[in-house]
Image (cartoon, rainbow, N blue to C red):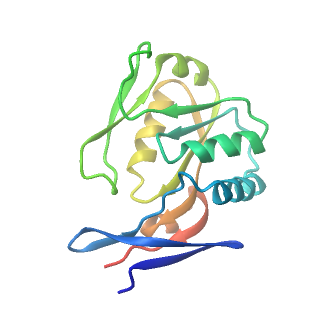
Amino acid sequence: MSEYYELKLGELTRKLPLIRLNPTLTIASFVLLGDAELTHYAAQKLTEQIKEPFDYIVTMESKGVPLAQELSYCMGKKRYIVLRKKVKDYMKNPRVLSVNAITSSQDQVLVLDGEDAQIIAGKKILLLDDVISSGGSMITAKKLVEDAGGQVILQAAILAEGEASERKDILYLERLPLFD
């Protein structure tokens, strides 16, 4: 097997290192952080495809943050919400839920600051991430948003990994295979 997977996203190409997660599963490691060109390109392409109006983008720390920033700018949104990976001292009445994600070997949580929960209550929400794979992070994020009174109207990502690419309830730009 090669050491890399060549990802083609429109006019852009990236070599993604193959990472063995366990004896039966290898993934192509997609790290959006630091790739301004790809982030901008993906945000432009998602902007073209997102037709339903929404009030806020909600994303997960940390790799979804640059995409949320760029997509917010492209779509004329002045603010987006970040679900954090741990409770921060500045948070007021944080809401915490456990998450099970394919790329993390340790237990994780997602945290919605209580002030952000008030902002999204009664609002239409676009859930955004860099990659949707097992969907664990998105399921947890959706529950946090809905528990706060927000309505998730769309789930979007740059890539859908493995079986996620067969889902009809998400918007994504390109498929990312899993490797045996």
Residue in the picture at 43% in, 68% down: 163
> Quick check: 9 above or below 143?
below
> Quick check: 178 above or below 69?
below
Residue in the picture at 56% in, 56% down: 169
Name the side, left or right, on which 175 lies relative to 80. Answer: left
* Residue 109 locus on image (x, y percent): 33, 36
> Quick check: 152 above or below 27?
above
Q: Quadrant of residue 70?
A: top right
* Residue 98 locus on image (x, y percent): 31, 37
Q: Is residue 137 visible?
A: yes
Q: Residue furthest top?
A: 92
Name the side, left or right, on which 57 lies relative to 91. Answer: right
Of residues 148 and 17, which is closer to you in this image?
Answer: 17
Residue in the picture at 62% in, 42% down: 68
Residue in the picture at 35% in, 30% down: 86
* Residue 122 locus on image (x, y percent): 62, 23
Q: Residue furthest front?
A: 34
* Residue 45 locus on image (x, y percent): 73, 59
Q: Residue furthest bottom?
A: 1
Of residues 87 and 53, which is closer to you in this image?
Answer: 87
Quadrant assignment for the C terminus: bottom left
Number of numbered tags placed on the structure image: 0
Of residues 8 and 4, which is closer to you in this image?
Answer: 4
Q: Quadrant of residue 143?
A: top left
Q: Is residue 167 visible?
A: no
Name the side, left or right, on which 52 lies relative to 15. Answer: right
